[in-house]
Image (spheres, grey):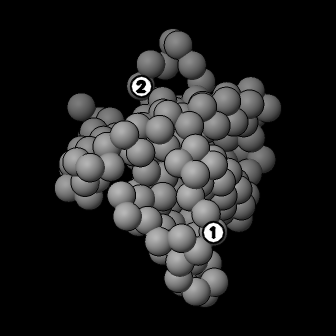
Amino acid sequence: MSTDRLLIIIGWTITTVLLLLYVPKARIRQAFVIFMFKQLITWLVGLVVVELRLIEYPVRSFAYASKTSFDFEYFIYPAFCVLFNLYYPEGKSFLKRSLHYIYYCSALTAVEVVVEKYTDILHYVNWAWYTTFITLFLTFFMSRQFYKWFFKIKENQAQSN
């Protein structure tokens, strides 16, 4: 097994463990809604990005089915979006809410940059790290707005479930 395939398996494992540890049973329904909404966004955007040849995924699961990364677009990124939304500091200061966005976007961007530089899992063609950061921010924002709308969460209302 190649190192790249091993890293993909490690990514799936870490993400699965994080979901199992940090998604409370009482909020599984919310997690599923967030997860599926994020899959919709990232799968469509991911397909457009690879078709426009902005990013390439030389090593990927289901290589004959799609040129995009099923692993990232359909599982890892939506899973982190679940954690982003479930642990969003609702009702906190603007600074804390902004830092929440910055933390998640920066962490995922940093991992992607390392993966792009040292593996064959991902290659930027006409893309840059800041494009990743911006698209992460926008899609996190979209998922947050959808989450608030779907569960009728008011601005500055502390979540109880």
Q: Is residue 84 above or below residue 71?
A: below
Gap in angstroms between the C-alphas marked 1 and 2: 39 Å
Judging depth in this view, the residue of 12 and 124 nearest the camera is: 12
Give the residue drawn at x 20%, y 55%: 21
Secondary structure found at label 2:
loop
Locate residue 25, reporting x and y percent: 22, 48
Locate residue 122, reporting x and y percent: 54, 43
Left or right, residue 52 beside residue 10 = right
Can residue 142 be seen? yes
Give the residue drawn at x 36%, y 58%: 161
Q: Check disc 1: other Cα within 10 Å, few if <14, some if 14-19, many if 20+.
A: few
Residue corresponding to mark 1 = 155
Q: Which mark is residue 25?
A: none
Judging depth in this view, the residue of 106 and 78 nearest the camera is: 78
Nearest to viewer (mark 1 / mark 2) = 1
Give the residue drawn at x 60%, y 31%: 40
Which amino acid does the dot numbered 2 rest on? Ser
Q: Is residue 89 above or below residue 35?
A: below
Locate residue 85, reporting x and y percent: 48, 58
Task: Pick whichever of labels 1 and 2 is earlier in the sequence.
Answer: 2
Secondary structure found at label 1:
loop
Can residue 102 be seen? no
Farthest-out residue, top = 64
Judging depth in this view, the residue of 99 and 51 nearest the camera is: 99
Q: Quadrant of the N terminus?
A: top left
Locate residue 139, reporting x and y percent: 65, 51
Residue corresponding to mark 2 = 61
Q: Check disc 2: other Cα within 10 Å, few if <14, some if 14-19, many if 20+.
A: some
Which amino acid does the dot numbered 1 rest on? Glu
Give the residue drawn at x 26%, y 49%: 26
